[in-house]
Structures are given as C-alpha cells and as structure tokens.
C-alpha cells in the first residue's frame, strides 16, 4: 500500500473529541487476525508495562485498515491531533492498566507511529509541515542527550502567580502576559523547574540515502530531533527510517552570528539591529526571519527491517535458541541447511553469483561474513575476531563487483574509494557544532561500519599518511583521537575488504608481492587473507567467462541458478554467528602443526612467497577455523576445519614464478678467475716458455723437450675445454695437414654436446641457499680460529693442531657429502640412485655458481699429475678443488 492509497475523508468533520473517541475505539478493538483472543494493542500495552517503557508504537497500516478516514486525517493534521491522541492513550491505559497512570509511579505516555510511507529527503518541503511522514537516511553524527523543556511553569515576578503547562515553541517561550487581572506583567518571568515538564532529546545529523540522490547532485543532510525513549536508538553509521513531522525552528546559528539581524515589526517596517537574540528584551514583539526546517521524529527503525533485510551482525549478542524461536516454522529451514554436508560448497556458489570462477576468493569472502569469535583477555585486552581480506589483481577481474556485492549484503556496510578518502574520512574528524560552537566528533567510514564491513576500493591509491591512520583500526579495532581538547577512543569493530591494483597495471608473478603493490608490510600483515587475481589468458577460460557474461546480460537474474538466495544466506549467517565454537585438543594440535609447516615452508632456503608468515597468520588461522566451524554450525573446531583454513592461507600466499635455470656446462669456463701473471696458462697465452729453459745454456739435456711437452699438454688441455664448450668451432688449425677435413671435419669424432640440464628456480634457489649457508659456517669457523693461526714457511697457514687450514674454504667432495647428509636427514633421498642423481645436479649447480661469479669461488685446484688424462684430471678436480664463498656474495632478503 502506498501513500496515495489513503483517501482524504473530506465529508467528515474531525473534531478533537471525534478523533479521541475513534482512536480509543481503535486501540480497544483492533485485531490483526480473527485468531487473536484479545485486542492487539492490549497485548502491546502489557509489553510496554513489562519493559517499563513510556511509548506505545502504533503501526500506521493498522490504523488505515481500521478507518481510512481517521488515518488520512491523522497524517494530514498530525501536529494538531498529537495531543488528542495522547489523551486517547491515557484513557486506554486507565481502562486496561490503571496503575500506570493513577499510581504513585505515574508517568507521561506518548503515541508513536511506525511504518509510515517514506518519502525522499529532498521532497520534504514546507508543504509537508505538521504532517505525519517518514524518510530514510544514514546517521553521520549524534549529539549527547540533553534535557528539553516541553511545558514550562513560570512565576510572575510582580504578583508571584504561577502559570503551569506553558508549551514551548522549540525555544524558550514564556507567557505573553500574566493571567492575573490586576497584574500587567509581560516581561518579568522566572522558570519554576520543579513544576515544569522536561524530556530527553538528542539531535542527529542524517545524510540522504545514496540510492535517492539524483544524478549530478550532492547528498543532502537534515537534523533530526529524537525525544523520549527514541534517544540513543540510532548511532553513527546506522541506516534508519525516521517517522515524525517536519517543523520550523529559528536558526540559532544565524541569529548568534555577528552582523545584521533582519526582523519584521508589527508596523510593517524592517529594522536592523545587532543587540543579541531577537524576540527578547528590547526586541519584544519582533519576529525573526531566519528559520530552518528540522524533523521531529517520534520513532526510528533500522532501514533493513523496512526493506526485508536481515542484519547478520546485530549490536546485541543473540543466542541461537532465541533466533530459532523467532521463526514460525521453528527454524526448520535454517536447521535443514545446517544438516547439509555440502553446505560449504553451496554457500560458496551463492556468494556473488554474477562473478565467474575465483572460488578461493569467494570462500574468503564467505568466511569473512561468518567471522571468528571475539575474545577478551583477563587484562581487558580485546582479541580481534573479524577477518580482513585483501584482493590484489589485474584490471577487469571483478574486484569492485565483489566489493559492491558485500556492501549491499549488510545494512552496516560502507563502500569507499581509497584515493578519495582521507585519514579523517576513514576514521573520524573533529568538527565544530554550529549551535554552541563546541567541538564534536564526526564519524568516518570505519566508524560508520562499526559492527559491519568496510569495503575500500583502490586501496593502493591511498596516500601513505592516510594508510597509517587505519593501522590501529585494522588490528586493535579502535580509533584514538586526541585533538581540539577531545581525547576519545572509539570503536571500529569492522572487517575490512580491500581491493588494490598492482603497480604497472599487471601483476608480475616473477616478483614478490611487495614489488607489485605499493602497500607497506605493516598493513599487509594485518590482512588475514591476501588473494591475487591474475588475468591468465587461456582459450577455454576465456570462452567460459565470455559465455557467462553474455548470459548475465541476456537473462539477468535468471542467468545462473544459485542454491540459496540472499535472504536465506542472511538468515543462516545470523544464526551461525550466534555459535561460539571452541578449540578441541585435536584442533589445537592441528593448528600448531599447520603453523609450523607454514613457517617451515616460508623459511625454507630458496622459497620466495608473497609475504612472511608471522604470529598474525597463526591468529588468522584460528579465526578462519572458527569461521569454518560456524559454516557447519558446529560448536567445536575439528581438524578438517583447520586444514581447510590452512589451504586457504596457502592459496593466498602466491608463490613467485621464476624461469628455470639451464645448467648447460658441467665444467667452469676457463678464465673464470683471473690467473696470476706467472701462471702457466697466462704465460702460454703470451707465447712464453713456461719453464724458462729453452734458451738456458746451463739447463740439463732434455729439459727443453720436457718443457715443450708440458706446454703441449697445457695446450691440449685448453683445446679439450674449448671442444667441450663448442665442438663445432674447436678444430685445430692444422687439421687439414693431419688428414682432417679443412671445414672442421677433424672434430667429427668428438663426443656430441650434452643436452643442458633444466632445474626449476625453486630447486636452484634451494641448493644455492643451502650451499651458501654451509660456506658461511666455514668462513665463520675460519675467522674464529684466526688468533691461533700461524704462518708457515711455504706461505700456508697452520693451526695449533698442526693441520693445514684452507683460507675459509672447503673441498667440493666434503661440501657434497654435507649436502647429501642434510637431505637424507630430511628424508628427501630414498636410495643410492637418487643420491647419485642429486650429486650430479648439485655439481652442475656448483659449476654454474662458480661461472656466475657471485656466490662461490675456487680457492685452489689440485695439481695435474704427469701423464694424467684430461678426463681423469677433470673428474679429480671436480672433487678435490677447494671452494670458498665469493667476496661479492649477498644473502637474499626477499
């Protein structure tokens, strides 16, 4: 039924007495259904008495169903008939509960209408003054509760006559003149507070609902006055529907402002003056021309109640039994969902169905809606139970669509953009009250989302100073303010769902997360789950996504079949959040084991992940496990819930993808280390005699031949190395003279080049880190023994035990043996074949690191024996050479 469905009964002359009688009959006789044994509002009155309240709430639809003419008149003349309705209520109470109005504890009772037909805020004009109406909006600021003078008792200062029950016209309004015929007093009055009637009042600043703002317009605000028991029923961030009347009040701020005061005198003339508030003192009889409209509300309802939404996070904790008792079917639909063994998968399919795929992200959002259990330590420290989720991904991955879905899922959900939000806009700001010029706190996005969810889009676009402001809100869930003489700690018990784009437009999986997103580690660690959405291009995936999007545009809501609609989800989550699961002994052991595994994987050599695993991730694991237990409505956390939470946490830690390493040569290239000027290889390259005996007359016979043979041997060694490096170009220059083919046919008999060994980046980094770790230990051990090392005559160094010490080095065969022992202790080497294969791979990695020249270096090589074959010497050199840590080595800090 809409507002136009209520006709105005012009044929009836509604006098106050007639209105009072009809409304009293309505309260005495109205029943919602024939099954009710007594009148509906008689039952409501008993509830009012039991709860010790002073307001009887009347549904406007009930009055319209009883008498449309009376309903129409009440709506049109609400300001006039409101005292008459209170008289009817007093008669009604005196009939059914006489002790409430005639007893010693009697009080004033009021009538408040609810569920009136709402209008847009910008449609509330002066034509609606005094009418019963309603509008919706979001509360952005609330004042403290103050006393208001409703009916004053004034004492004449000349004849001492007391005038009681003087109504106040939204300002201090003394009587016009004394009722004593012998007294002409019009100015001197004294308020008798003991005989005056006061009530509580509170002013709210309400902003227009987002869906009601026209295109190109800014949202408007209106001050709402709450009286009596309606005070403290709304706080900043609540989306409310207010029912009441539009009133006109003097603009106190304009009157108190310095400058000219415009007034209207009875002579029709205008007068300018600056001597204080008009209408008092010298200005008696003048009427102020500065007014503004305010909304005098008699009742306020949460907007989700009027729209059929269910608040899954009520302000007051509810028991599961009380929630089940609210349903007519005894909550059978909810309990049936809880008994479904596949409820986790069904709920995941029901979350944001318009987005294709991204199952892990939908599961993260689902667990965020269920949330963990809030706890409080014996010291009074609150432990966060809300789950924070961040989504980092390429453009056009539906990040904002997921945020919009969550923002529409809860009544206390706030959607904001990071670039357009300042620190004060996210937390709270201190503003000056226009009436009394005092400072007050105005809520920001996180305060507005208290006990809800704050969705922040473009999180990476925020300034650094604004990001720092939400550190406290994300972990301690409070906002501390100390400015303008105000020191306060405000609640911000909200989950944060943030979306960010990677730097450069696309996520580079070859880099860690901190190089992809402009977010500090302090904020990244405060997110329980941080998922990365990568726009990978595959033909099958692209076809399925395109088909899904086309179906959404073609069939809209019928494009997909979800197991549960939004309302069913809200009812189920509300019931599940009333359960507080406890950690069992098995779950405790699984939590400890899972955390150790995550830490071990994160600290493993060569592992590079999106972010480090800290104690905060352990707490996140606990919160996710509690949310999983709530999904199944289980009062105990089972090990399988912990394993699923660990899987989600692993899925959110995106491993860095790196290209494989090619180990194309199992020998270090010649010239890896600079040879000394007197080294044989260097002298041969310069064409010098390596022994200096060719032209020595005193040399023994055959010495030159031996020297020539030694030079030839080294030349052949260098030629063999060149053949292994590139057999096609390593043919000797005189190949044709020796019977070989001039075009390199002499190399045809050489063994073919081996296929390069491909090692994954993770394996390569793991071995590199393990070897570097051992080499650091060797170097540190050498440095610790330096005070006891003494030089020998041959230039080497010897310890106190007499054994020669390498200069911070270790033989390669000892290094390989240490590595095999370490891997065998971890259970990674099962048999001898695996050990031989591992030795081959690690040897190639060692050669690669030596050739690269930033991790390992060759300290010394074994000397070549006389007549030793190239292959034998090379094999022996692989095991007997001494390695040391390169001077340029720097541990990875990724």
Image (cartoon, helix red, strand yellow):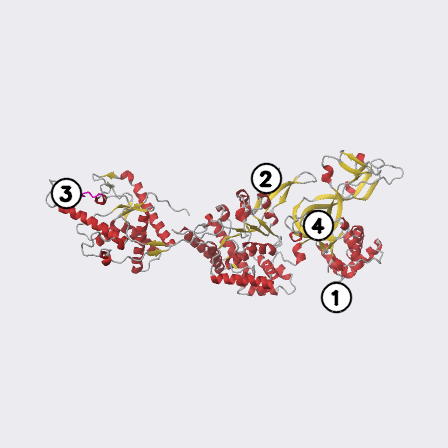
Mark closer to the observer (2, 3):
3
Q: Earlier in the sequence, mark 2 or mark 1?
A: 1
Q: Earlier in the sequence, mark 4 or mark 2?
A: 4
Residue 692 showing in the rendered view:
yes
Q: Earlier in the sequence, mark 2 or mark 3?
A: 2
Query: Where does residue 697 sit, x and y in percent of width and height?
Result: 11, 40
State whether residue 56 is above or below residue 422.
Answer: below
781 left or right, relative to 587 = left
Name the residue carrying label 3: 694
Name the residue carrying label 1: 34
The reply to whether discs 2 and 3 touch (Cβ–Cβ < 8 Å) is no
Of residues 763 and 644, the one drawn nearer to the viewer in this rendering: 763
The reply to whether discs 1 and 4 touch (Cβ–Cβ < 8 Å) is no
Read off the magenta span: 686-692
Mark closer to the observer (1, 4):
4
Name the residue carrying label 4: 122
Q: Earlier in the sequence, mark 4 or mark 3?
A: 4
Mark closer to the observer (2, 1):
2
200 left or right, relative to 370 = right
Q: Quadrant of residue 1?
A: bottom right
Residue 278 showing in the rendered view:
no
Give me the C-alpha separation between circle 1 and circle 4. Answer: 41 Å
Name the residue carrying label 2: 482
Give me the C-alpha separation between circle 1 and circle 3. Answer: 130 Å
Per the image, label 2 sits on a secondary structure element best described as strand
């Amino acid at each position: 039924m809409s507002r136009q469905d209520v006709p105005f009964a012009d044929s009836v002359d509604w006098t106050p007495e007639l209105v009072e009688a009809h409304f009293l009959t309505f309260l005495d006789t109205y029943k919602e259904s024939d099954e009710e044994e007594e009148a509906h509002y008689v039952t409501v009155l008993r509830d009012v008495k039991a709860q010790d309240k002073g307001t009887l709430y009347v549904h406007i639809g009930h009055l319209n169903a009883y008498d449309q003419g009376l309903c129409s008149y009440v709506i049109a003349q609400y300001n006039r008939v409101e005292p008459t309705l209170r008289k009817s209520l007093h008669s009604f109470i005196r009939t059914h509960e006489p002790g409430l109005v005639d007893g010693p504890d009697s009080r004033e009772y009021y009538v408040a209408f609810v569920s009136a037909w709402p209008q847009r805020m910008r449609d509330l004009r002066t034509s609606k003054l005094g009418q019963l109406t309603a509008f919706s909006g979001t509360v952005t600021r609330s004042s403290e509760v103050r006393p208001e003078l409703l009916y004053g008792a004034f004492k004449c200062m000349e004849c001492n006559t007391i005038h009681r029950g003087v109504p106040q016209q939204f300002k201090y309004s003394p009587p016009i003149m004394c009722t004593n015929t012998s007294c002409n007093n019009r100015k001197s009055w004294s308020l008798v507070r003991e005989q005056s009637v006061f009530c509580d009042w509170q002013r709210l600043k309400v902003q227009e609902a987002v869906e009601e703002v026209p295109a190109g317009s800014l949202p408007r605000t209106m001050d709402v006055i709450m009286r009596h028991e309606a005070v403290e029923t709304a706080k900043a961030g609540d989306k409310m529907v207010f029912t009441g009347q539009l009133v006109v009040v003097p603009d106190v701020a304009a009157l108190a402002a310095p400058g000219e005061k415009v007034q209207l005198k009875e002579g029709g003339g205008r007068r300018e003056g600056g001597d204080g508030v008009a209408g008092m003192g010298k200005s008696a009889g003048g009427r102020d021309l500065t007014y503004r409209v305010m909304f005098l509300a008699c009742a306020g309802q949460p907007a989700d109640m009027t729209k059929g939404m269910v608040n899954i996070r009520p302000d007051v904790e509810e028991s599961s039994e009380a929630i089940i008792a609210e349903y007519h079917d005894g909550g059978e639909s909810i309990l049936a969902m809880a008994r479904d063994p596949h409820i986790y998968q069904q709920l995941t399919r029901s979350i944001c169905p318009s987005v294709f795929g991204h199952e892990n992200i939908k599961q993260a959002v689902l667990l965020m809606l269920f949330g963990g259990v809030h706890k409080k330590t014996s010291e009074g420290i609150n432990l966060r139970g809300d789950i924070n989720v961040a989504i980092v991904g390429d453009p056009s991955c539906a990040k904002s669509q997921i945020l919009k879905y969550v923002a529409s899922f809860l009544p206390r959900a706030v959607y904001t953009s990071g670039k357009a939000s300042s620190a004060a806009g996210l937390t709270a700001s201190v503003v000056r009250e226009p009436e009394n010029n005092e400072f007050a706190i105005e809520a920001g996005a996180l305060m507005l989302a208290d006990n809800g969810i704050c969705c922040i889009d473009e999180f990476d676009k925020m300034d650094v100073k604004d990001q720092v402001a939400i550190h406290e809100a994300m972990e301690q869930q409070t906002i501390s303010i100390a400015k303008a003489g105000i020191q306060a700690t405000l609640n911000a018990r909200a989950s944060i769902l943030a979306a960010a784009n990677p730097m450069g437009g696309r996520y580079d999986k070859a880099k860690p997360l901190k190089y992809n997103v402009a977010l500090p580690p302090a904020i990244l660690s405060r997110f329980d789950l941080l998922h990365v959405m990568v726009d990978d291009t595959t033909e099958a995936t692209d076809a399925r996504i395109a088909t899904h999007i086309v179906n959404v545009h073609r069939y809209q809501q019928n494009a997909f079949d979800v197991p549960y609609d939004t309302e069913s989800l809200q009812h189920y989550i509300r019931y599940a959040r009333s359960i507080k699961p406890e950690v069992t002994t098995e779950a405790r052991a699984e939590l400890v084991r899972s955390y150790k595994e995550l830490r071990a994987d994160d600290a493993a050599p060569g592992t590079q992940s999106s972010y480090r695993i800290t104690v905060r991730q352990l707490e996140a694991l606990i919160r996710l496990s509690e949310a999983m237990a709530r999904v199944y409505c289980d009062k105990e956390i089972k090990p399988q819930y912990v394993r699923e939470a660990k899987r989600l946490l692993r899925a959110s830690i995106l491993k860095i993808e790196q290209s494989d390493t090619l180990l194309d040569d199992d020998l270090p290239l010649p010239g890896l280390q600079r040879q000394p000027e007197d080294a044989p290889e260097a002298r041969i390259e310069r064409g010098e005699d390596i022994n200096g005996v060719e032209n020595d007359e005193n040399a023994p016979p055959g010495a030159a031949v031996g020297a020539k043979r030694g030079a030839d041997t080294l030349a052949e060694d260098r030629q063999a190395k060149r053949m292994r490096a590139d057999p096609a170009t390593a043919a000797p220059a005189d190949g044709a003279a020796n019977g070989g083919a001039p075009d390199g046919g002499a190399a045809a008999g050489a063994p073919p080049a081996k296929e390069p060994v491909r090692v994954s980046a993770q394996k390569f980094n793991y071995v590199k880190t393990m070897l570097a770790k051992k080499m650091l230990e060797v170097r540190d051990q050498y440095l610790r023994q330096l005070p006891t090392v003494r030089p020998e005559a041959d230039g080497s160094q010897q310890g106190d035990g007499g054994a020669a010490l390498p200069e911070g080095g270790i033989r390669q065969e000892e290094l390989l043996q240490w590595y095999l022992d370490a891997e065998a202790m971890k259970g990674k080497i099962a048999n001898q074949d695996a050990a031989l294969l591992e030795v081959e791979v690690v040897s190639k990695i060692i050669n690669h690191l030596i050739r690269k020249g930033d991790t390992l270096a060759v300290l010394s090589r074994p000397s070549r024996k006389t007549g030793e074959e190239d292959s034998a010497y090379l094999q022996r050199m692989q095991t007997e050479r001494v390695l040391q840590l390169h001077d340029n080595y720097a541990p990875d800090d990724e």
